[in-house]
Image (cartoon, coloured by chain):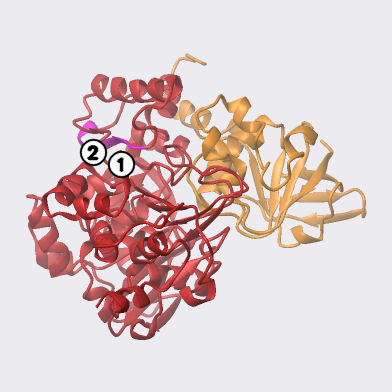
Chain colours: A orange, B red
Amino acid sequence: MIGRAFVFGDNIDTDALAPGIHMKRTPHELAARCLESVDRDFAGAVRVGDFVVAGANFGMGSSREQAAVSLKLLGIQAVVATSFARIFYRNAINLGLLAVVFPQARDIVAGARLRIDAEAGTLDNLDTGHRHAISPLPPHLLAMIRAGGLIPHLKLQFGASGASA
Amino acid sequence: MMAVGWTLIEKIVSKAAGAPARAGDIVTVAVDFAFAHDSSGPRRWEPMLAELGAVPWDPARIAIVSDHYVPALDIESAEILRITRRFAARHGIANFFDMIGICHLVLPERGLIRPGAFVAGGDSHTPMAGAFGAFAMGFGATDMAAIIATGRTWLQVPETIRVRFDGRLEPLITAKDLMLLLCRRLGMDNSGKAVEFGGGAVEAMDMAERMVLCNMAAELGAETGVIAPDSVTFAYLRGTGVPVADEAAARALASDPDARFEVSYCFDATTLAPQIAAPHAPDNSGDVGDYAGVAIDQAYIGACVGAKIEDLRMAARLLAGRRVASGVRLLVAPASQRTLEEATRDGTLATLIAAGAILLGTGCGACAGFGAGVLAGGETCISTTNRNFQGRMGSGDALVYLGSPFSVAAAAVAGCIVDPRDMLEHSS
């Protein structure tokens, strides 16, 4: 799926992704405030399949999983960054939101059309015509993404009879 | 391979993994103790546990602390607290602490954080427990739900950064000042690293100050912070009524002399000036003199890192016989009920109130924008809290500076940021 790049800088924190003042609202209401302190138009402008592209230490700060949930609810296909804060990275993978470490993320310009194939380990920039290799996830994390996240993955182990939400 | 000694981190993870584990290894570990609060805990776990058909793996190894949405400000908060209470009752969680303080302080106060333990917490400031020689790591709610269901999790064993603070802290210089310096020097992108603190200035610290160091390892972006247990640790734990049974074993957790550190830093604590972090990040810090004269609307003394009894006493030393400046509000949210009891008993609270401080309930309060004391657009606050990201403490157009309790109290009196050392000189 092809999506557009929404580009951010370094150290995008969880208070920008999921502002504390809105944390008790519904997940969709919270998602509507996602990144508003950095880019007021982001939540309104983003479409299903788009990408968030950023510099270093994306998702620093709080352990609040709503930071990753909000991006997922807005339809973000993947976050591409030069590096991630560890808790955010785990949260994203646990929720089935692809988080891709890409050292050249800063070269991607706003609005660029991207396509990622996590299994094949490729990132295509359709505007520049470049295909980049992205480092594959460790096998246990790729299995989790394939299952749709940590809970669906664990469910296979628990063998719970699909008492789903 | 040549024999190399073990870091404190490697020793704890090896024990939890049941097999030797070196920095860089990806391992599965048995969790000794797991906790979360009302925001990250039961309200998020319940649907996931239901989907798994799972119950808590061991209620005796789980603690839940309601500290974020307390006291309930509206129906949504009340509902979150109700769900939290119901979960604790339903699953027999004896270590449930309802509105009596912030998890990172309430748990050590009761001796629940043990040297050598692998601690998993549903909050990014979980590393505060590392002050007791535990490996304490923060997780998001889904990871925590999986831990609650299975008692296990995975991690990549972090490399260790060793930070030594040599010399001794001068009067009115605190662990908070050391950490604001360290944020500037090490940056906030230390994912995959653990920070082990040591050196003369750390050995001389009480547990309250050591907890500040480890708490703010989170601001470095580190996996955790840790300090080898010593006689100060053991004395604190004796005071909780749950002494360490085998002190020799706990001392042996210390990193071996030939352990491999990724990098070691040494800082001279003696020459440090009070540090202030300017908006909007803890690493945007400098000497207090760089920010002198910045006018404030609010001074906030709160949070796990900055409203322990020791922090309130620091503020009281500055505020004794003085008044909060006209047009400035000083809010104090003690980190726990025991903190408040102690402050009442020893006169600290009376000093704060006499100076014009406004007392708030115990809990996380305005620190993360959940509770009372948040800021309007255009307002400026100086705070004893640990992070000042844009929009964290209320409006995205507010400005938050971070400092020690001395610096915050001094600013409350002056109406602007000042060097607290000048103020104490004037009074003597």
* Quarter that holds the C terminus of chain B: bottom left
What SS does tag 2 mark? Answer: helix
Q: Is residue B37 visible?
A: yes
Q: Please state which amino acid type lies under the numbered disc 1.
A: Ala
Is B4 displayed left or right of A114 in the figure? left
Q: Pick whichever, B421 or B356, lies toward us.
A: B356
Queried whether the magenta region covers residue B19, the answer comes back as no
Query: How many numbered marks, from 0 up?
Result: 2
The percent coordinates of residue B261 (x first, y second) are 41, 76
Residue B141 lies in what quarter of the image? top left
* Quarter that holds the N terminus of chain B: bottom left
Up the image or down, B358 lies above or below B317; here it is above
Is B367 displayed left or right of B66 in the figure? right
What SS does tag 1 mark? Answer: strand
Mark 1 or 2, nearer chain start: 1
Q: Which mark is residue B61?
A: 2
Magenta segment, which residues?
Answer: B59-67
Q: Pick whichever, B335 or B190, lies toward us.
A: B335
Q: CA distance from mark 1 to mark 2?
A: 6 Å
Q: Give me the residue at 24% from left, 71% from top.
A: B254
Q: Residue furthest front?
A: B326
Is B165 displayed left or right of B232 in the figure? right
Q: Chain of mark 2?
A: B
Q: Give me the residue at 66% from left, 37% from top.
A: A71
Please say if the residues under marks 1 and 2 sit with CB atoms less than 8 Å apart.
Answer: yes
Q: Please state which amino acid type lies under the numbered disc 2.
A: Arg
Q: Chain of mark 1?
A: B
